[in-house]
Image: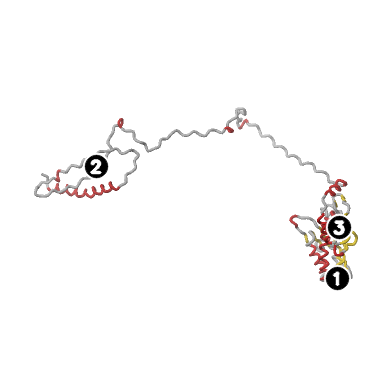
């Protein structure tokens, strides 16, 4: 028979292990099964543990004390001989042979007829760059009869002629003329502008400059009535067609006078008072105010307006022309 101290130690150990056994069973019931790659092998349930001998009832008069069950031993996989192990499924997918690369396109296949390319050190040297072709020979400047025929081939501005008729301009068609580069394909001989405005001797000019003079002189008549109380009767022209360069320069660009597309106004003629000459008027006078007003109005009818103060070459007249410029630019000085 064991001493009482041994029985008490065994009983206290069983009481301490009882909560752990209950907690392990509860965790085993609630824990989710873990995934496994191999199928579970059935194992027979374990045998219950043997009752400890020190918990046996020694005195029949005392009720037996129930011993707390011990925690179950962990389940162990049965040991199977290697030659008896069943074929288990594998988690890793079966890896096959790597795929072959796509076939080479036909057009990229080497051509036996061409042979292989030579190595870089044996490649032929690049040929020298070819010289740029020379531009075609520039034809000689047209002059004489050829230039006259070319000038006559230009179309006539019939719409402009209709507008001159509506404005009352007196004119006649002149013969085409060519003097070197100074060409007149369709010149007009103008003797009078609209509203009875004379210009003295007949002047050779283009239809466009004649139209501009007709529009402008209509405005000049209104300004003369307002500033001077006298209607305008005529213009004094210094020249319209002159084959020369700008400002009479021998090497300068051709003037619009070389194409009869300009007019130099030297003065204004009235019925009952003395003519007003450009550039000889005292500052602050009515005559000076009149010339300044008509000069400003000319910028609406002509693309170029030059006069006293522009330069020394235009100190005594108003130069008016219809030079064509980019984007309709006008020069008014």
Please tell me which of labels 1 and 2 falls first in the chain. 2
Task: Say which residue label 2 marks.
Answer: 73
In the rendered structure, find residue 240 and report the number of the disc placed on it: 3
Relative to 86, is 308 above or below? Answer: below
> Which secondary structure, mark 1?
loop
Q: Residue at x 24, y 42 (%)?
A: 73
Please tell me which of labels 2 and 3 falls first in the chain. 2
> Which secondary structure, mark 2?
loop
Give me the C-alpha separation between circle 3 and circle 1: 27 Å
Tags 2 and 3 touching, CB below 8 Å: no
Relative to 286, is 326 above or below? Answer: above
Q: Nearer the viewer, residue 180 or 185?
A: 185
Q: Quadrant of residue 127?
A: top right
Q: Residue at x 82, y 43 (%)?
A: 139
Give me the C-alpha separation between circle 2 and circle 3: 130 Å
Q: Is residue 94 left or right of residue 277?
A: left
Task: Say which residue label 1 marks.
Answer: 230
């Amino acid at each position: 028979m064991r001493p009482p101290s041994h029985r008490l130690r065994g009983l206290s150990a069983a009481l301490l292990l009882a909560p752990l056994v209950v907690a392990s069973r509860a965790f085993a019931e609630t824990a989710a099964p873990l995934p496994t790659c191999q199928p579970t092998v059935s194992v027979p349930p374990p045998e219950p543990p043997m009752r400890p001998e020190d918990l046996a009832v020694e005195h029949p008069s005392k009720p037996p004390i129930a011993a707390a069950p011990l925690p179950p031993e962990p389940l162990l996989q049965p040991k199977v001989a290697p030659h008896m192990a069943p074929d288990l499924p594998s988690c890793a997918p079966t890896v096959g042979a790597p795929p072959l690369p796509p076939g080479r396109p036909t057009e990229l296949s080497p051509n036996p007829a061409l042979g292989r390319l030579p190595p870089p050190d044996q490649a032929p040297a690049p040929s020298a760059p070819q010289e740029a072709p020379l531009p075609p020979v520039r034809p000689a400047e047209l002059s004489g009869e050829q230039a006259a025929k070319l000038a006559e081939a230009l179309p006539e501005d019939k719409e402009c002629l209709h507008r001159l008729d509506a404005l009352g301009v007196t004119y006649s068609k002149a013969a085409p003329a060519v003097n070197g580069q100074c060409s007149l394909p369709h010149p007009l001989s103008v003797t009078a502008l609209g509203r009875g405005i004379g210009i003295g001797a007949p002047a050779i000019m283009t239809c466009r400059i004649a139209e501009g003079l007709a529009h402008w002189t209509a405005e000049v008549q209104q300004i003369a009535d307002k500033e001077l109380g006298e209607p305008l009767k005529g213009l004094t022209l210094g020249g319209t067609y002159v084959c020369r360069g700008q400002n009479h320069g021998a090497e300068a660009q051709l003037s619009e006078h070389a194409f009869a597309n300009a007019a130099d106004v030297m003065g204004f003629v009235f019925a009952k008072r003395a003519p007003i000459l450009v550039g000889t008027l005292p500052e602050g006078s009515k005559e000076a105010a009149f010339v300044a007003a008509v000069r400003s109005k000319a910028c609406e009818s002509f693309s170029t307006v030059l006069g006293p103060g522009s330069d020394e070459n235009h100190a005594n007249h108003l130069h008016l022309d219809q030079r064509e410029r980019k984007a309709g630019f006008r020069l008014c000085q």
